[in-house]
Amino acid sequence: MCGRFTYKLTWEEIVALYRLTLGAAPHNFQPRYNVCPTTTIDTVIANDGKRELMRARWGLVPNWWSKPLKELRLATFNARAETVTTKPFFRSAFKSNRCLIPVSGYYEWQDTPGGKQPWYFTARGGSPALIVAGLWDEWRDKASGDTVRSCTMIITEPNDFVAQVHDRMPVLLTERQFDPWLSGEAGVEILKPAPEDLLQKWPVSKRVNSSRADDNDASLIDRIELAAA
């Protein structure tokens, strides 16, 4: 699964990465080092053939959900590639509401005799972002009348590199896959593990084990030395 990530992109990097129209930044882009489910994140959607930035709750709320949001207790921040076309929470969005979710890196946890050890994964070669295949939906809160846009990341089996730490990984798309994914032309055939040479990883402090770790704390991604087994 992918349940925590970092986001350090500038508005100019987002524009260049997704070929958006450069205008005024839609919000204040501050580095985030502990992005958690249910918080608001940036996604990119296709609208009338153009790509645009959309803010969304991380944790998908399907448009047919009829209860208050607080009663949605399922973890919907990830959708498994193997069942994304059949699970009621995701199958409609898979057909019509695709998005791209930019992250600077993400955390995964390894079970060890000393407890869960977090590792930080990011791109090799200095790329500022990893692009995760996502889905989005729009839900209306009947009680308040508010409209909530939300999203989920698609996860798949790990490649060998990630499998050293964890048994799942996010679906990471290449630039040539952006249009086919957003348009719906591409299907589950592209929801595959990333190439072995795409990522790098290192162990980080267990402080990030807490979802309450400071989102502004850049030291969360600092490499640590693991004690000898």
Image (cartoon, rainbow, N blue to C red):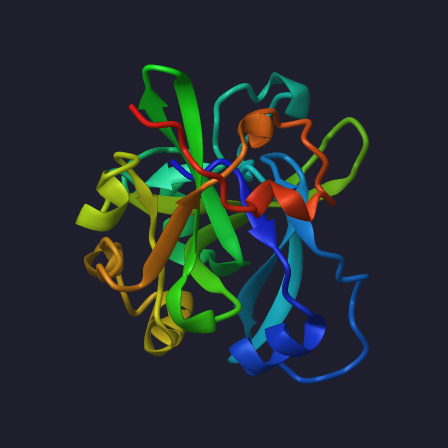
The image shows residue 99 at horizontal and vertical percentages of 48, 59
For the point 36% across and 56% down, which residue is it?
200
Location of the N terminus by quadrant is: top left
State left or right for residue 85 relative to residue 40: left
- Front-lying residue, 75 or 139: 75
Location of the C terminus by quadrant is: top left
User: Measured along the vertical axis of the image, is residue 37 above or below residue 66?
Assistant: below
The answer to whether residue 37 is visible is: yes
State left or right for residue 140 relative to residue 157: right
The image shows residue 159 at horizontal and vertical percentages of 21, 49
The image shows residue 167 at horizontal and vertical percentages of 25, 34
User: Measured along the vertical axis of the image, is residue 151 above or below residue 127?
Assistant: above
Farthest residue toward the front? 228
- Front-lying residue, 198 or 98: 198
For the point 68% across and 78% down, which residue is it?
12
User: Measured along the vertical axis of the image, is residue 94 above or below residue 226?
Assistant: below
For the point 71% across and 84% down, which residue is it?
22
Quadrant of the image occupied by residue 179: bottom left
State left or right for residue 70 relative to residue 195: right
